[in-house]
Amino acid sequence: MRKPRLVVLDYGSGNLRSAQRALERVGADVEVTADRSAALAADGLMVPGVGAFEACMTGLRGIDGERTIADRLAAGGPVLGVCVGMQILFSRGVEFGVETAGCGQWPGAVVRLDAPVIPHMGWNIVDAPAGSLLFRGLSAATRFYFVHSYAAQQWEGDQDALLTWANHHVPFLAAVEAGPLSATQFHPEKSGDAGAELLSNWVGALG
């Protein structure tokens, strides 16, 4: 049986090798690359991201990654965004009063969490909806590893999307599943067995 072929998109941001190892752990053949052709041809594309929204968008555009993501999705190719790789899928990010255009796959803004302790760092439960593919088989008490100061706190997109919420003094989107495009605000590659099960669910659905 052929292993699913995955690409972790290398645009200068994210825990690339950690993501690669986590996906290999669940049975995928993984390449870390900025190559557009490889990213388009893969069975699945992971878009990681850490740090500032603006810096990630600059790096992504430097490899034509925004167009690569759009072209994959237009062809029905699965994409998984992680952490800031989730945030940049929205229309815009606002950091320190500066607004930066994102990929625009989903409407809405990523803004600072209104919480006394920032960043939100550590393990947290999530509220996943019925019918979720990513969280299939995971109990409501399962914890995932977060480290972020910004998040999407409203959903303005497709009402058929499956939304998973978490709370750090305010509610925020912990994951979105919308057709071929999925994303998590937490780091599945740092979330131990729970993260591995989530990635296994995603990889197993790639066909």
Image (cartoon, rainbow, N blue to C red):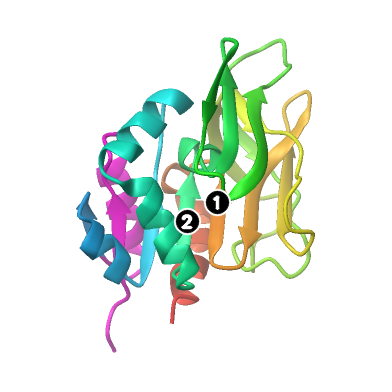
The residue wearing badge 2 is 80
Check whether the beta carbons of the residues at disc 1 and disc 2 lie within 8 A of each other. yes
As for residue 17 lying within the magenta part, the answer is yes
Q: Which residue is drawn at 43% across and 82% down?
A: 207
| Region of the chain picked out in magenta, as a range | 1-29
Q: Nearer the viewer, residue 29 or 145?
A: 29
Quadrant where the N terminus lies?
bottom left
Instruction: Please determine whether, in this image, residue 194 is positioned above or below residue 201.
Output: above
> Is residue 52 something one can see in this rendering?
no
Q: Which amino acid does label 1 sit on?
A: Ala
Label annotation for residue 183? 1
Q: Which amino acid does label 2 sit on?
A: Leu
Name the quadrant containing residue 41: bottom left
User: So how many labels did they put on this image?
Assistant: 2
The answer to whether residue 177 is left or right of residue 69 is right
Q: Residue at x 57, y 28 (%)?
A: 93
x, y percent for residue 14: 34, 37
Q: Which of 131 and 153 is in front in this view?
A: 153
Q: Residue at x 72, y 51 (%)?
A: 157
Q: At numbered mark 1, what does the secondary structure look like: helix, strand or loop?
A: strand
First in sequence: mark 1 or mark 2? Answer: 2
Characterize the local packing of mark 1: few (<14), some (14-19) or many (20 or more) Cα atoms within 10 angstroms: many
x, y percent for residue 131: 73, 70
